Amino acid sequence: MSSIDRLDADLLAALSEDPRRGISELAALTGVARNTVMARLSRLSETGVLQGYDVRVDLERLGLPVTAFLHLQLAQGGLQEIIDALARFPEVLEICITTGASDLVVRVACPGNAELQAFVQEVLAVPGVVRTTTEIALTTPVPYRVAPLLAALTAGRGRGRAGRPAQPQQRG
């Protein structure tokens, strides 16, 4: 497990809000030198904490206003084959393996309810899918975010050397 401090959290939060922010802007936002930002981002990437720079797409503006969550119950065995089959559908945005009544939760986007219904029938035709339950998202009042979690995770932690005032050098 990688440990992060407040500066790392601030950088990650700023990038999660706008992945196009450059090094200079991140340095200005966090009050540290550009080299510090570059070193921190490099370390976060190397340790796997930072896994890329995502683009957020407004699916509704692309004609895909229906977001739904399909809860799938599967026959025993063949999990990877079912995941591979589902991943081939362009409507599938995300697949999570879960505990509880469902084995998988699949997030999908469709142009309308009729298309969603047809898509559910295609999913039911995948060998190994036994049952589906579908929930349609009406709105997303809190979109995916990490900034509050990062802030809570690093509460009480410092900002590393970059956040500390310079120490006078001892003469000796």
Image (spheres, helix red, strand yellow):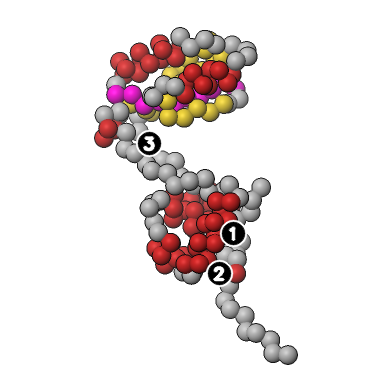
Up-down: is 141 above or below 29?
A: above
The residue under label 3 is 140
Q: Is residue 119 left or right of residue 168?
A: left
Tell me if I can see residue 29 in this picture: no
> Disc number at residue 163?
2
Badge 3 or badge 2: first in the primary sequence: 3
Secondary structure at badge 1 equals loop
Residue positioned 41% across, 40% down in the render = 143
Q: Evaluate if marks 1 and 2 touch, with contact meaning CB atoms under 8 Å apart.
A: yes
Residue positioned 58% across, 21% down in the render = 80
Q: What is the x, y in percent for residue 88?
A: 44, 22
| Amino acid type indicated by mark 1 | Asp
Of residues 137 and 30, the one nearer the viewer is 30
Secondary structure at badge 2 equals helix
Badge 1 or badge 2: first in the primary sequence: 1
The magenta stretch spans residue 104: yes
Residue positioned 55% across, 60% down in the render = 40
| Amino acid type indicated by mark 2 | Gly
The residue under label 1 is 5
